[in-house]
Amino acid sequence: MSLRKSIAPYLLALPYSLVFILFFLVPLVLVVVVSFWDYTEYSIIPDFIGTNYSDIFGGCIAKLPDLCTAFATYLSTFKYVFLTWIFTLVIGFAVAYFLAFCVTSLPVQIALFLLCTIPFWTSNVIRMISWIPLLGRNGVVNQGLIKAGLISEPIEWLLYSGFSVTLAFVHLYTLFMVVPIFNSMMRIDKSIMEAAYDAGAGGWKTLWNVVVPLCKPGIAIGSIFVITIVMGDFITIGVMGGQQIASIGKIIQVEMSYLQFPAAAANAVVLLLLTLMIIVAMSRIVDIRKEL
Amino acid sequence: MAGPKTKFFLGLFFLLFLVFLYGPMFTIFVLSFQGPDGGLTFPMNGVSLHWFKSLWEGVGVVDIGRAFRRSIALGLVVMVITVVFSLMAGLAFRHKFRGSTPLFYITVASLIVPSIVVSLGVALQFRLIDDALKAWGRENEIEWIVQEFATTMGLFTSGMGAQLTWTLPFGLLIMFAVFNRFDPMYEEAARDMGAGPWATFREAVLPIIAPSLVGVALFGFTLSYDELARSSQAIGGLNTLPLELRGLTTTVTDPSIYALGTVTTSISFLVIILALLFAWVLRRRRLAQGSDAGKGMV
């Protein structure tokens, strides 16, 4: 009995662990290993060279202050990360605040929360495509603006542009902010907020000095999610950017389509390190395990 | 707490957010019923099912029906595995075991490592396996490997594995949330009445957590059915629906792509509604049967 009891957790965790060893850990190790390999047009050759890395940033330092392709791509990716992060954070916080503090009936709260989460269970590509009839050259927005006499020519930058990419990111990923921030807010003891009011703190002061600090874990988790997703994105940027905008993820994808696995792997390692740095910075704020 | 003015503006903001969330989806839903002469945008040129018919007859070279069936099949398999494996792991995490902390961190890492990196890794792994198998086949002159073998990559090997790294963490995190709120009293009561571990699990634990398991199943199926980034490089020769869809965004220039959007979104909605209903019924049934004293055998 006691032997059975002591090995039971291991047996129970085994299938789950095996999946992650086979399809996550080993592949990640392979990415790191292969990033040092050599390659030709049709094969990859075991080796230990650094050229895949030096190729990424080839001539970048010499070129400064002009940006080489790699730096420009990284910078552009960071731009989308930052814009998406700011917008999802502000919108997500406001939505979560409404759900947590303005809705008092629990069933209504659950219903509205579900309403926010349902799109998460539908197709991302469809949600991207659904902007086309709105933002296109003859789309709803342009037609409306022309009819209203605000513009005479359709605006071209609404679709297949940096604007539409950012819009789609915000549309797709605000939920990742809403859920953890809402979760943090629901744990706030309402009497603390009342105490702040009673002590004479105004609405904004209470928000900034009481609610925001107590929501830090939720904000950190949401931020980690949004930032890492946008950092590695190649699909949204591809579809909404009309395949014209570069990103780190797209570089990896293109290199893979040319079967340049070691080059793609080197780029992936750089991407992974950048992502890791952001997460380490964020996780100083929060212990994720306490949040469940 | 919040003043009436704050409440009003936040309520308005929330409403606008919902319009922002659902508006575009609703637009393509309407436009998918565009008349035969209608285009990709308004005005509607009549109302018809023309584009659904043209979708049925096939868009370009892509066999939508096949891709659709592949996605459903993969979604169902991923769903079952996600429910069973994360339930088992969730039960394991209720006890202390060596390696539980690393396993937890791997789970979180899997959620936040960029999907393209996972996809690349899985693709690399299977390519290396292929190369090794082919070399081995040539050396030992195994005919079918030399003649016929192409790749180990496929829907239910590399594709499924890549998707599981995305669905399983959600499953386990839900299980954590469930067991954090689970009262062990029920199990103790069952044990006191002489139930073994299996009977305790089946008769006491399972009925209580069943609604949450439906939630895990919902995550498992929908996340797989719509999954794109992780399987994109690792699916092998036969594409799933989302992958075909991404290709179609650049080639199809008529409303049949909206029709496709309406069909897939309807299926997602159907699955969501069924899952919510099912979870609700399970909850109701448990609450109704909270005590069966005096009811005799059921």
Image (cartoon, grey):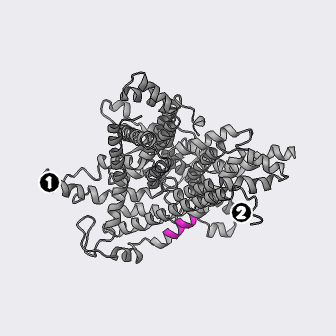
Q: Residue at x 51, y 60 (%)?
A: B272
For residue B48, above or below residue A46: below
Q: Where, by quadrant of the figure, is residue B97 drawn?
A: top right
Quick check: B70 left or right of B205?
left
> Magenta region, mostly helix, strand or loop?
helix
Question: Which quadrant would the C terminus of chain A be assigned to in this image?
Answer: top right
Q: Residue at x 35, y 49 (%)?
A: B15
Q: Where, by quadrant of the figure, is residue B156 drawn?
A: bottom right
Residue on which disc 2 sits: B140
The front one of B126 and B142 is B126
Residue A9 seen by the camera: yes
Q: Which label was assigned to residue A148? A: 1
The front one of A252 and A48 is A252
State the CA–CA distance, disc 2 to disc 1.
Answer: 76 Å
Q: Where, by quadrant of the figure, is residue A209 drawn?
A: top left
Q: In what element is the residue under mark 2? A: loop
Q: Position of residue A161 (x, y in %)?
A: 29, 49
Q: Amino acid at mark 1?
A: Ala
Please provide the residue range marked out in magenta.
B68-74
Whether residue B172 is in magenta: the answer is no
Chain letter of mark 1 equals A
Count neighbours of disc 1 (C-alpha within 10 A) and say few if under 14, some if 14 to 19, many if 20 or more. few
Q: Residue at x 52, y 35 (%)?
A: A276
Q: Amino acid at mark 2?
A: Asn
